[in-house]
Image (cartoon, rainbow, N blue to C red):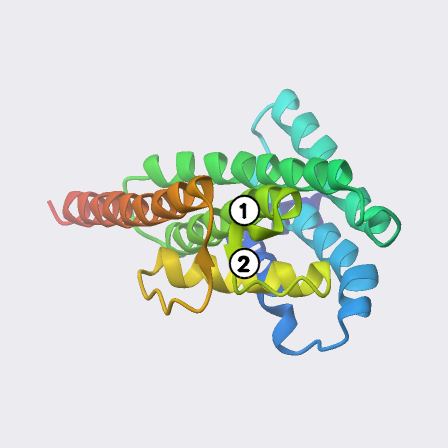
Amino acid sequence: MNKIKGNFQKYKYELLLAALIQHLYIGIVVRDMPFYIEILWPINMVILGLASVGVFIEKGKAKNIIKNVLTIIVILFPVLLPVFNHIPVFMCMLNVSYVVFFLFIFLEVFKFLLKPSYINKDLMSASACGFFLLIESFVFLFQIWIYNDPNSFNGIDFSSPAHTFIDLVYFCFITLTTIGYGDITPNAYYTKLVTSLIGVAGQFYSVVLVGILISKFTSNNK
């Protein structure tokens, strides 16, 4: 047990990064959308919950309790999704819980980025985790509005929750990276404002991250 715990702690950011990538990109290899929603999504959230364990080791009892409660919630919601996906309140609760879950992990990862005075594999993996956690947070933030008002975006596929999620992952990535193809566009004032916020958040994270890495690199060479 101690060995397993030690491995979770030793490879915490690599495990979290792998879990985030498989959650965001599993749609590349899985084309069966009902299977994606009913089977893979709950499994993905179990993987993410386990992969985030190492980040919260030795972070205090309160943080671990909050993280565990949030993990249970984000696993239960997709299990119930096939039954309640037509209920707007359920979809709103699902998306709010996911935003809180991913932001909670992001804040802990970002705190780590500020602490070490050296550059190593943990720092690089944590940097990538921070980027993907921002994407996850914005995807589910947008879903709060989309399920309340389908006209808040143009170009989104509403044929299934999986298609909607994949379209928003794509949209958030091209917006955060400032590519902006324009095939999916915000169509309401609030989604336009939040889309602009994604651009600001992405640039801010990149600038802060570069500053952190430069300061750590220069401090190592003094």
- Amino acid on which disc 2 is placed: Leu
The residue under the point 58% across, 30% down is: 58
The residue under the point 54% across, 46% down is: 142
The residue under the point 81% across, 67% down is: 34
Q: Is residue 212 left or right of residue 191?
A: left
Residue 96 placement (x, y as % from top left):
63, 36
| Nearer the observer, 146 or 119 | 146
Q: SS for tag 2?
A: helix
Marker count (numbered)? 2
Mark carried by residue 200:
none
User: Mark 2 or mark 1: which comes first in sequence?
Assistant: 1
Distance CA(mark 2)–CA(mark 1): 8 Å
Q: Disc 2, disc 1: CB below 8 Å?
A: yes
Query: Furthest-left residue in view?
Result: 222
| Nearer the observer, 57 or 114 | 114
Which quadrant of the view contains residue 215? top left
The residue under the point 69% across, 62% down is: 162
Please name the residue that numbered disc 1 is placed on: 142
Q: Is residue 38 left or right of residue 53?
A: right
Q: SS for tag 1?
A: helix
| Nearer the observer, 172 or 19 | 172
Please name the residue that numbered disc 2 is placed on: 168
Q: Residues within 10 Å of mark 2 (few under 14, many from 20)?
A: many
Rendered-image quadrant of the C terminus: top left
- Amino acid on which disc 1 is placed: Phe
Residue 41 placement (x, y as % from top left):
74, 58
Which quadrant of the view contains residue 30? bottom right
